[in-house]
Image (cartoon, rainbow, N blue to C red):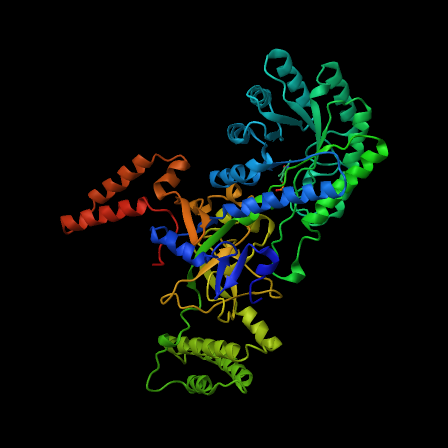
Amino acid sequence: MVNYGIDIWGKENFTVKDGLVCINEGSKPSLVEITQEIRNSGIRGPIILRFPHLIGKQIENLYSNFTRAIDENGYQGSFNAVFPLKVNQYPQAVNSIIKYGAAYNYGLEAGSKAELILAIAQTPLGSPITVNGFKDTEMTTLCFMAAQMGHNITVTLEGIGELESIIEVANNTNLKIPQIGIRIRLHSSGSGTWAKSGGMDAKFGLTATELIEAIHLLKKHRLIKNFSMIHFHIGSQMEEIAPLKKALREAGNIYAELKHMGADGLQAINIGGGLAVEYAQNKQQCLRNYSLEEFTNDVIYVLREIMNAKGVEHPNIFTESGRYIVASHAVLITPVLELFSQDYQEKSLHFSEENPPLIEELRELNTLLARKNCIEYMHDALDHLESLFTLFDLGYITLQDRSNAEILVHQIIKKSLRMMRGTPTLELTRLQDRLQERYLINSSIFQSMPDYWGLQQHFPVMPLNKLNEPAIRAASLWDITCDSDGEIQFDPEAPLYLHDVDLDEEEYFLAFFNIGAYQETLGMNHNLFTHPNECSIDLTEDGFKLRNIEESQNILEILDDIGYDKDQILIQLKNNLANSHFTTVEEKSDTLQKLELYLYQNGYLRTTK
Ligand SMILES: *Cc1c(COP(=O)(O)O)cnc(C)c1O
């Protein structure tokens, strides 16, 4: 995995140039220079880099592919899309969505009261807003208010009970009635981890019987003209196309049946989200079995065929893809703080005048190691190490002897790996994988990649630099939380190889890609590590410009957030210091200053320069 699968998950968004990961756009600046520039402003800890142009690219892909499929199939309906806010509500992401979506009339989807307020405030008038999720009368009223303001808003009923609340608000106010959508419960369900949104036992949606009842109620209360959309969503990260086609056939037939039952205002099918993102780093593990072209062709073709067969006008199509739109725009940069076997370095060897014979032998093996003998010598070294451990347990050698032995054996293995680089033996590969070097990264998996913790979702990861140097250390990644789940391990069949770096001499950063969907608000403040630093990067003709650098919350803010009075905490700490013993007044004031500095910094580690 020389380029870390960048051509698989990277979709030409990123490229490797002169050993550096670069943005594949404009003057192709490297991620390491962007990271350094942000760190030059004093920021330490993990950084989310946002690339608005990648949001623009995905929106453009979505619309152009549907437009193409519509043209090619002579489809009569229009294509429309909304962005589901639950996938990323952060302002820097949403602002880019609004900006790049404006040309397409791209709208927003809300699933809670807070998201609805955001959608009403941010969606340009005329662009669609759809509202899903469970609602009370208050939330329904908010939808009426939005309609009154001139918004093109559709409230989707998740259950028949919500229709009563719409009828109630319609009867009791003079507000404009929004358009009404109905989530249908499909018997065909999705596939993959997130498939619980579809199927007969789904959490949402009306059954066939409830649909018929809803039509009667809508007619009775003269709301049938407002009923404009049916909706389904078969689950996120839909890795196979077959379940979608099945769901489309079912939904298409329901649509046609409802039209025949006199749903005259009905004009749209909302196919929800679910378009998958490729997270795999090697070909064998590719997840998605279809392209966007295939997806759009299928949607248009299946719906056209059903409507033509049943003599119904082609419906307008809505999608609510979220993951597909924003996953690629965010990259998490994490500084590496430590390599745990970093201590196994030549400079830590300390021999005496006279050393145990086995140690002397290890020294000799280490000196004489060459490509033609390295496997044999490595076997001898491992053998000697076992014996030396036994000697230590029996009290015959010193702690210094033991340390020398461990360092020498590590040296021998590392050198052998390097010598055999082009032609590693199975044993060597296994040994390497077993000796997975632990790289300590300055971030929290719980905060920044909660789906790894909760769903074992892997995110593509690679170093920012040194890509033209051999990476020979099979790695596992440890975060800085005090939780044993805070580790990312790699399949021994598909290890992650990183570089052997001396962090006293140079910095080393790892980047996690495709983290722009779902991770940010799902992330949790375990150990009180909060949302990372973030920054948007605009590409210019000759480079890049940093915009909206937001530093991660400082320590006092973190405590304040969970309900402590930060002033109280500050006073308490200052009092404790004031009452403690110092020899000089300067010492006391220096310590106070330091304390204040620490409290106003973010909670991540600051050991790197
Ligand atoms: C979550 C959700 C989406 C977004 O799904 P993606 O897989 O991110 O595209 C769309 N529609 C509804 C109703 C959802 O709940």
Viewer can see residue 189: no
Q: Position of residue 166 (x, y in %)?
A: 65, 19
User: Which residue corresponds to the image point at 57% horizontal and 77% vertical from the top-left?
Assistant: 422
User: Which residue corresponds to the image point at 50% horizontal and 45% vertical from the top-left?
Assistant: 52
Q: Position of residue 192 (x, y in %)?
A: 68, 48
Q: Is residue 391 above or below residue 458?
A: below
Image quadrant holding the N terminus, namely: bottom right
Which one is in front, 570 or 372?
Answer: 372
Direction right: furthest residue: 309
Which one is in front, 61 or 444?
Answer: 61
Displayed quadrant of residue 458: bottom right
User: Which residue corresponds to the image point at 42% horizontal and 68% vertical from the top-left?
Assistant: 342
Badge count:
0
Viewer can see residue 490: yes
Q: Position of residue 4 (x, y in %)?
A: 56, 62
Q: Is residue 332 above or below residue 223?
A: below
Direction left: furthest residue: 584
